[in-house]
């Protein structure tokens, strides 16, 4: 398994129940294929560099995890169809393998 980092943000006005459901969906997408979530950091509300979908702020979260490279496509698909996730980025961390 390889080390990855997922950074994403949701709207800061999102209700807490929806936010928790989004976290559970992302967590289950990672662990369903045998991946392991190492660390979750909630960065909180931050100003965006430019307006995205009429939002000027975003509620950021960072997830460090280990997964097989073939499973990243499924995690990417789940993030794309999750309406609450505005933007995301998955990066391979070779320094943490």
Image (cartoon, rainbow, N blue to C red):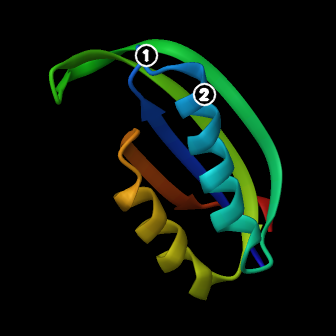
Q: Is residue 1 above or below residue 20?
A: below
Towards the viewer: 83 or 96: 83
Q: CA distance from mark 1 to mark 2?
A: 13 Å
Question: What residue do we see at 15% from left, 21% from top?
Answer: 54
Say which residue label 2 marks.
17
Residue 63 visible in this rendered orientation of the protein: yes
Mark whose residue sits in front, 1 or 2: 2
Label 2 CA crowd tier, 10 Å (few <14, some 14–19, many 20+) = few
Q: SS for tag 2?
A: helix
Q: SS for tag 1?
A: loop
Q: Position of residue 91 (x, y in %)?
A: 53, 59
Residue 27 picture quarter:
bottom right
Q: Quadrant of the N terminus?
A: bottom right
Q: Quadrant of the C terminus?
A: bottom right
Question: What residue do we see at 72% from left, 31% from top?
Answer: 41
Left or right: 24 as drawn, with respect to 19: right
Label 1 CA crowd tier, 10 Å (few <14, some 14–19, many 20+) = some
Q: Which label sits on residue 12?
A: 1
């Amino acid at each position: 398994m390889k080390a990855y980092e997922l950074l994403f943000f949701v709207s800061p006005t999102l209700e807490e129940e929806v936010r928790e459901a989004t976290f559970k969906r992302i967590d289950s997408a990672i662990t369903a294929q045998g991946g392991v979530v190492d660390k979750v950091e909630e960065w909180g509300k931050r100003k965006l560099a430019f307006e995205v979908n009429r939002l000027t702020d975003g509620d950021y979260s960072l997830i460090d995890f280990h997964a097989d490279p073939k499973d990243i496509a499924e995690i990417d698909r789940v993030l794309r169809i999750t309406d609450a996730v505005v933007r995301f980025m998955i990066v391979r961390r070779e320094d943490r393998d």
